[in-house]
Image (tube, rainbow, N blue to C red):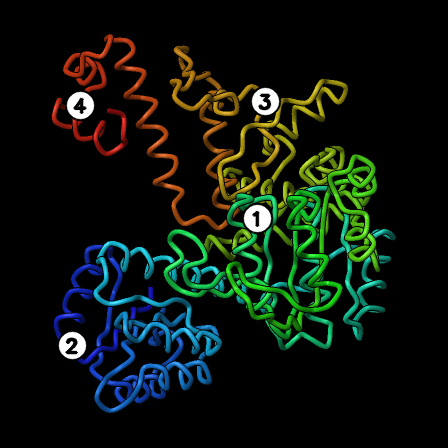
Amino acid sequence: MKPIWIVDDDQSIRFVLEKALLRENLPTRSFTNPREVLAALEGASDEEGPQILVSDIRMPGGSGLDLLGKVKELHPGLPVIIMTAFSDLDSAVSAFQGGAFEYLPKPFDLPKAVELIRRAVEESQREEVSEERMAAAPEMLGQAPAMQDVFRAIGRLSQSNVTVMITGESGSGKELVARALHKHSPRANGPFVAINTAAIPKDLLESELFGHERGAFTGAQTMRRGRFEQAEGGTLFLDEIGDMPFDLQTRLLRVLSDGHFYRVGGHNAVKAHVRVIAATHQDLEQRVREGVFREDLFHRLNVIRLRLPALRERREDVPMLTRHFLQQSAAQLGVEPKRISDAALAQLGLFNFPGNVRQLENVCHWLTVMAPSQVIEAKDLPPEVLTAAAAPAAVPAQVPRPVAGYEAPEPVASSPLAEAVPGEPLPVSDQPAPLDGAAPAWERGLEAEALALLAADRHDVWDVLTRRFESKLILTALNNTRGRRIEAAQKLGIGRNTITRKIQELGLE
């Protein structure tokens, strides 16, 4: 990872931040004044540049706010955290429009400072991945007539800023269409900002969309820009708009009507120069009839409607998409791309893909990792595909509870992980593994969950699944021994100090 650059003339501040970030395995590089930073930026390659910049405001030889402006000219996407004394805060807030990621008041609480820096790092990494995807991804793939209609509509809308509503099942590629609409619009040079309104708690969504002023609510120590301001001059993509709370629908309608909004706790109107693209998998007309979605907002959003077909409606695209995703998955994992036989493609074509294109992408990730040879045969396909092909009339398996941050693929048949209940031990088969080498159901379930997390570009897969595995294993042993730790440790084959430490680390007290 690229280093975090720290700019402060106070050696003690630099020392404290360096040591705290080092403990978090975050590399650093320190400077004493803005001139040093600008000189280093001019001579640095993309790999040598900063992941984020943390700068004081008042320093000999230059102001942190002036540095912010110059850095944003050179690297518009670089997150910058401004450190400032409390007496400087009110004047510094006025520079938020200059692009500061956040403010860190002095004297600061070190754990909170590290948490803020880590959040900025994660945001930076997400933006890098998003930019790489947009740069590397080809135009949308599809030869089916329904997809050709979508392509024609994108072409017709290429010179327009009109509001668009995208409908289609989950996983059908609505965000991809929204990005294409942005890329081929007059706002292509502006930012593309996406927000899933169903994934953010109601109490936070208003602040996420419109921002907030300092002191607007408990914990609002600084002014923060919302997604509308972040998308200034570009496109704001509102995914799952059908789940937006009713009271926020009123605020959104006002923005779309007159182009102004107020930050939470604010009294000055902010002008929004933003194109809005909305998406939903729900029947909004039905939600209007049920009284949970405003009819006037529906008509305001429904200027142009694009319907994305489900993958089962465009089965002729499955071979092309499969080969593309196999190439993509191999590139991500740094391995040789696998080929797929005609028989395997025919088998995939029989599957209904309830998770649509996203599910096919996850299947290709699974095949890249799990298929035993370079040529994928029909017998190498995931169990859910083979099971569906063998028994097309069977009742589909219950969809597993999703892990936060990703949408799970079609579950493996009879996977115990799919039926796991938080706080209860995982069901583990006491039967030996089959002699033919096939993995037990719980292992296949683990594979499916790991692949889904990997496909969602998560960077904590090891931690997430290891914590779940260790927690369930220890709880099962403790249940078996009625809470006797030493006996549980002996049965697990670990030391008593180890089980005590693990219980504390995993919060199982």
Which residue bears the numbered disc 3? 413
Name the amino acid type tagged 2.
Asp
Q: Residue at x 60, y 70 (%)?
A: 269
| Residue 437 visible somewhere in the drawing | no
Please tell me in which quadrant of the rendered image residue 460 appears: top left
Return the disc, 1 or 4, that comes first in the chain's sequence: 1
Horizontal placement of 172 versus 446: left or right? right
Q: Nearer the viewer, residue 104 or 32?
A: 104
Gap between marks 3 and 4 measured at Cα: 33 Å
Element carrying mark 4: loop
Name the amino acid type tagged 1.
Lys
Q: Which mark is residue 10?
A: 2
Which residue bears the numbered disc 4? 494
Gap between marks 2 and 4 measured at Cα: 48 Å
Which of labels 1 and 3 is toward the front?
A: 3
Which of labels 2 and 4 is toward the front?
A: 2
Find residue 249 and report its horizontal and vertical position in percent. 69, 50
Find residue 481 and report its horizontal and vertical position in percent. 23, 8
Tell me if mark 1 has few (under 14), some (14-19) or many (20+) residues whose alpha carbon lies within 10 angstroms of its own: some
Q: Quadrant of the N terminus?
A: bottom left
Return the disc, 1 or 3, that comes first in the chain's sequence: 1
Give the residue at the far front of this rendering.
267
Which residue bears the numbered disc 1? 338
Tell me if mark 2 has few (under 14), some (14-19) or many (20+) residues whose alpha carbon lies within 10 angstroms of its own: few
Q: Nearer the viewer, residue 459 or 11?
A: 11
Check if mark 1's residue and mark 2's residue have beta carbons within 8 Å: no
